[in-house]
């Protein structure tokens, strides 16, 4: 991408705010932001809009100006794949902008009340919520818990409460259709793929997958964290592509943590056997057996292997935070994603303090922080959704 270009695919901005980007997408965004102050200002407004919603200042102005501004900033000649993300993000932005504009005009007191209520309420844990992006450009908010019945590419898609399920028995089309399930911060969701494989997606994650596995393998793409229970099929190996790493299995249970902001990619095996290798260097392979974990340090073409306590890495799926000599700097990353808050360190030395313990993920944030404070090593101050470590 030319650094002086005024165009960027809106999906990159949307993914930066809601989930995470690939290395190439991060580079494109960085170049685009550096090209002009106007780009940075636009990005800041979009991020503030999605983060703050009805607390956005000058709501009436935004409803008139923000949407046309989107068209001026995105490249409408992108590939079909990127256009699907654009159509989703753009239509969602338009709907929200217009809705907020009308509410600001008719009921301005609603916004003042919302700010007061948020300031007085506790910061509650995450819930089951997700956004489904379909191959045909449509999207569905699964956060409401309503039952849905859909169809794409011949596959039957159903959503009930906190789960999404695919049935491809009637699929006859040769063209593969891809869906993406996006889990925002403060969310989690369960997915059953067309082959029966179960996937639990953690906060701030996304999974791209076909509505039916038509080829010689079963390949999905992950950003963030997910726990897989793979249905056995010796004729079709299951592959997870994530951050330049590939995990290949026939049928097993394992966890992958591959957040963009983390320095490492962790693959932890619960049962069965998996092969872990680099997408560009498949000969550098690690074979994992139960209670083993591979560690890929980003920027280095080497995968290490070690023995671990599996519970430490899969406890999130069972509703727990499990810290075992984990630094506070690492702990707060999990808390930020689950409670949709931001931490800042006033006490820089506190970053390296190790903590060991087990806390339920369904406690309010204040209760979790009080338990950490009982060690006497650190204190927290909460203002709205920003937590200062003192």
Image (cartoon, helix red, strand yellow):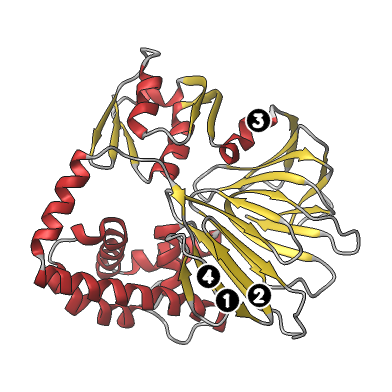
Q: Which residue is mark 4?
A: 148
- Residue at left offset 40%, top offset 28%: 368
The picture places residue 258, in percent across and down from the top left corner, at 59, 48
Q: Badges 3 and 1: C-beta atoms under 8 Å apart?
A: no
Eyeballing the image, is 237 above or below 262?
below
Q: Nearer the viewer, residue 320 or 300?
A: 320
- Tell me if label 2 and label 3 are in contact, CB under 8 Å: no
Q: Residue at x 65, y 53 (%)?
A: 199
Identify the image quadrant of the C terminus. Answer: top left
Q: Nearer the viewer, mark 4 or mark 3?
A: 4
- Could you say whether the residue bearing mark 4 is in a helix, strand or loop? strand
**CB within 8 Å, label 2 to label 1:** yes
User: Which structural element holds mark 3?
Assistant: helix
Task: Say which residue label 2 marks.
Answer: 156
Rounded to the nearest angstrom, the CA distance separating label 4 from label 3 is 34 Å
- Say which residue label 3 marks: 311
Compared with 44, 103 (above or below) is below
Q: Is disc 2 in contact with disc 4, using a CB cutoff of under 8 Å?
A: no
For the residue carrying disc 4, how many other residues have a C-alpha within 10 Å: few (<14), some (14-19), or many (20+)? few
Indicate which disc, 2 or 4, sits on the residue closer to the N terminus.
4
Residue identified by numbered label 1:
150
Would residue 104 be found to the left or right of residue 358 on screen?
Answer: left
Spot occupied by residue 52 in the image (x, y as percentages of width and height):
26, 56
* Disc on the earlier residue, 2 or 1: 1
Q: Earlier in the sequence, mark 2 or mark 3?
A: 2
| Residue 5 visible in the shown view | no
**Disc 4 to disc 1, C-alpha distance:** 6 Å
């Amino acid at each position: 991408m030319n650094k002086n270009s005024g165009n960027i695919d809106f999906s990159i901005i949307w993914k930066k705010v809601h989930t995470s980007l690939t290395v190439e997408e991060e580079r494109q965004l960085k170049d685009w932001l550096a090209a002009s102050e106007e780009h940075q200002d636009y990005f800041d407004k979009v991020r503030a809009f999605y983060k703050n919603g009805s607390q956005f200042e000058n709501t009436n102005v935004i409803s008139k100006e923000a949407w046309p501004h989107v068209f001026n900033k995105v490249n409408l000649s992108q590939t079909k794949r990127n256009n699907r993300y654009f159509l989703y993000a753009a239509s969602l932005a338009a709907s929200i902008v217009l809705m907020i504009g009308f509410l600001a005009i008719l009921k301005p007191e609603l916004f003042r009340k919302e700010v007061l209520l948020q300031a007085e309420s506790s910061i509650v844990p995450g819930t089951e919520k997700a956004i489904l992006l379909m191959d045909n450009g449509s999207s569905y908010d699964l956060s409401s818990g309503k039952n849905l019945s859909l169809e794409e590419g011949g596959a039957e898609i159903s959503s009930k409460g906190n789960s999404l399920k695919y049935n491809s028995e009637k699929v006859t089309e040769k063209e593969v259709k891809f869906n993406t399930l996006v889990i925002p911060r403060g969310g989690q969701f369960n997915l059953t793929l067309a082959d029966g494989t179960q996937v639990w997606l953690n906060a701030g994650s996304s999974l791209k997958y076909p509505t039916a596995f038509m080829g010689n393998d079963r390949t999905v793409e992950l950003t963030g964290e997910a726990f897989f229970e793979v249905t056995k099929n010796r004729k079709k190996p299951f592959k997870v592509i994530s951050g330049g790493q590939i995990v290949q299995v026939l049928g097993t249970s394992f966890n992958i943590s591959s957040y963009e902001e983390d320095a490492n990619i962790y693959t932890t095996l619960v049962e069965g056997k998996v092969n872990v290798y680099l997408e560009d260097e498949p000969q550098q392979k690690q074979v994992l057996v139960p209670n083993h974990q591979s560690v890929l340090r980003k920027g280095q073409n080497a995968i290490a292997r070690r023995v671990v306590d599996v519970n430490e890495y899969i406890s999130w799926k069972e509703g727990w935070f499990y810290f075992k000599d984990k630094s506070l700097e690492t702990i707060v990353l999990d808390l930020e994603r689950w409670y949709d808050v931001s931490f800042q360190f006033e006490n820089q030395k506190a970053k390296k303090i190790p903590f060991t313990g087990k806390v339920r993920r369904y406690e309010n944030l204040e209760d979790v922080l009080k338990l950490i404070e009982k060690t006497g090593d650190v204190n927290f101050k909460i203002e709205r959704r920003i937590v200062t470590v003192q």
